[in-house]
Structure formats: C-alpha cells, structure tokens
Image (cartoon, rainbow, N blue to C red):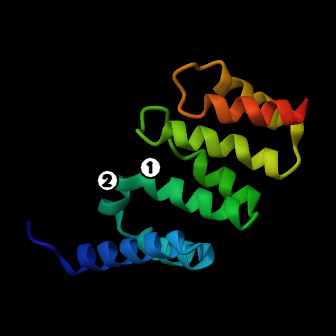
Amino acid sequence: MNWTKTDSFSANNWRQAVQSFIKQDYQKSITLLQTINTDSEFMINHAGKYSLMKGVANLKLENFNDAEIELNKILSSNPYYDQAEWYLALVPFFNKNNQLAKERLTKIVQNENHYKVKAATQLLSQLE
C-alpha cells in the first residue's frame, strides 16, 4: 500500500493519541484526535473507534456534553456500538443525572448479550 503524506500524518497522530490515552493524558489525546478529524478517508474508515476514544476521553475529563456528542455519533451498525452504549450510560451516571443513567443502564441490563450486563446491574443497584 502506498502511504500519502496525509495518511502517514494521520497514522502517526492516531498512534500518539492512543498512547496519550493509555497514559491517561486525555486532553492531549483529544488535541491529537482533532488533527485527524480533517482526514476524511481516515474518518470514513475509523469513525467508530475515533468517536469512542474521543468520547471516553471527554468523559474522563468530565466534559459530559462533548462525551455525549461523540458517543452518539456511533451508529448501532458499528462494531463499537456496545462500548458507546456503555459509556453513554456512564455519562449521566457520573454527571449525577440519575434518571437518564437508570434508563440507559436498564437498556443494557435487558440485553443479556451486552458485554457490560453485570457492571450495569451493579451501577443500577447503586442508583436505587
């Protein structure tokens, strides 16, 4: 595969964004992700994982509105949807919006195949 300068730039910034995220430097991760946002090919091919990482980073920084916006960009047909659904339930949980958190956690609990059923059940019990 021939890499263009833009591909290389995006790939490098993606790697750095992931490394920053792993090191819990969420603000740096978001800043690096924003530089990739202009690469339409990257965004088409990696929209789910991009929005997931940016959403979770915003959640960790307690930028709840930004987290909600990013996570809601992940469509149900995307392989990252179940993770987005989980973090979308955590947004109101940590933002102390108990009613919305209950609704979202209940939806997860009702899906016996969801990878976070047990964790959602535990959080739900904390809200009752």
Q: Position of residue 25 (x, y in %)?
A: 59, 77
Q: Position of residue 40 (x, y in %)?
A: 35, 62
Q: Position of residue 108 (x, y in %)?
A: 64, 27
- State the quadrant of the C terminus: top right
Front-most of residues 67 and 112: 112
Q: As displayed, is residue 41 above or below residue 76?
A: below
Residue position marked by numbered label 2 in the rendering: 45
Q: Residues within 10 Å of mark 2 (few under 14, many from 20)?
A: few
Identify the residue shown where x is 33% and y is 74%.
10
Q: Label 2: state its secondary structure.
A: helix
Residue position marked by numbered label 1 in the rendering: 48
- State the quadrant of the N terminus: bottom left
Front-most of residues 55 and 120: 120
Q: Label 1: state its secondary structure.
A: helix
Q: Residue 63 — which label?
A: none
Identify the residue shown where x is 65% and y is 18%.
110
